[in-house]
Amino acid sequence: MSYNRGDYRDKWRIEKRAAGVRSDLGLDQIQVLDPGALAGTLGAEILHLSDLTDDEIALRRARSISFDGMASTHPADGTPIIVLNCGKPARRRIATLMEELGHLVLGHRPSRIYTDTELGVLRRSYDKAQEQEAYDLGAALLLPKERIQRDVGQRVLIEEIADAHTCSRELVTYRINRMRLARRYASYGRKAS
């Protein structure tokens, strides 16, 4: 099934899927989700680059590369493994973790690694619709529609919402925009700045 971020039917399908996963975890649509608990439920192991290498130079360089994280499976037993770039800010890593968990929940096929025939370098396949779907599901799992609607209705600031969910301001802003609450938020958010 192809995903179209601009299609309201796909948007609400993702919201419904997130609500179902949260319900399966015993959470309502207001409670804060622990991404680690979701990973555990999915049988996924979370690693950071620092778990894979102690090369200080490589770890310092990790701050400046565009790699945020990835998911794969252990070749021996198929255990889902999520690797996060420890060089990125902790709250950014939450968005990456939620996206990778979204891929697992949705049962997406992993990217494949192949050799570019013209350049002879390794490349990774990329499915934009799949990436957007996983990101949107991860965001909806962490920041459910009802919670965002409640918080904006109660005039809670983006920073406070981000703190409550240990995520970035950017992710909260994305969800507010996705829920079409940007104008309502702007009516009080600017005044508080």
Image: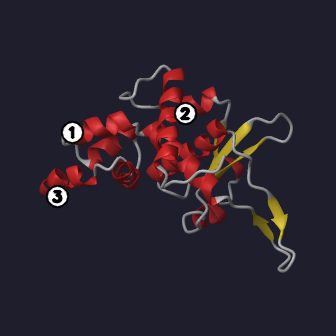
Q: Nearer the viewer, mark 2 or mark 3?
A: 3
Closest to the observer, 17 or 124: 17
Given contact means CB atoms under 8 Å apart, are the residues at marks 2 and 3 in contact? no
Q: Which residue in the structure is indicated by mark 1?
A: 153
**Mark identifier at residue 190:** 3
Q: Which residue in the structure is indicated by mark 2?
A: 36
Given contact means CB atoms under 8 Å apart, are the residues at marks 1 and 2 in contact? no
Relative to residue 162, is residue 124 drawn left or right? right
Number of callouts in the render?
A: 3
Q: Is residue 63 visible?
A: yes
Crowding around mark 2 (Cα neighbors within 10 Å: few <14, some 14 to 19, many 20+) is some
Question: Residue at the left extreme?
Answer: 191
The answer to whether 35 is drawn above or below residue 10 in the figure is above
Crowding around mark 1 (Cα neighbors within 10 Å: few <14, some 14 to 19, many 20+) is few
Q: Is residue 85 visible?
A: no
Mark earlier in primary sequence (2, 3): 2
Given contact means CB atoms under 8 Å apart, are the residues at marks 1 and 3 in contact? no
The quadrant of the image that shows the C terminus is: bottom left
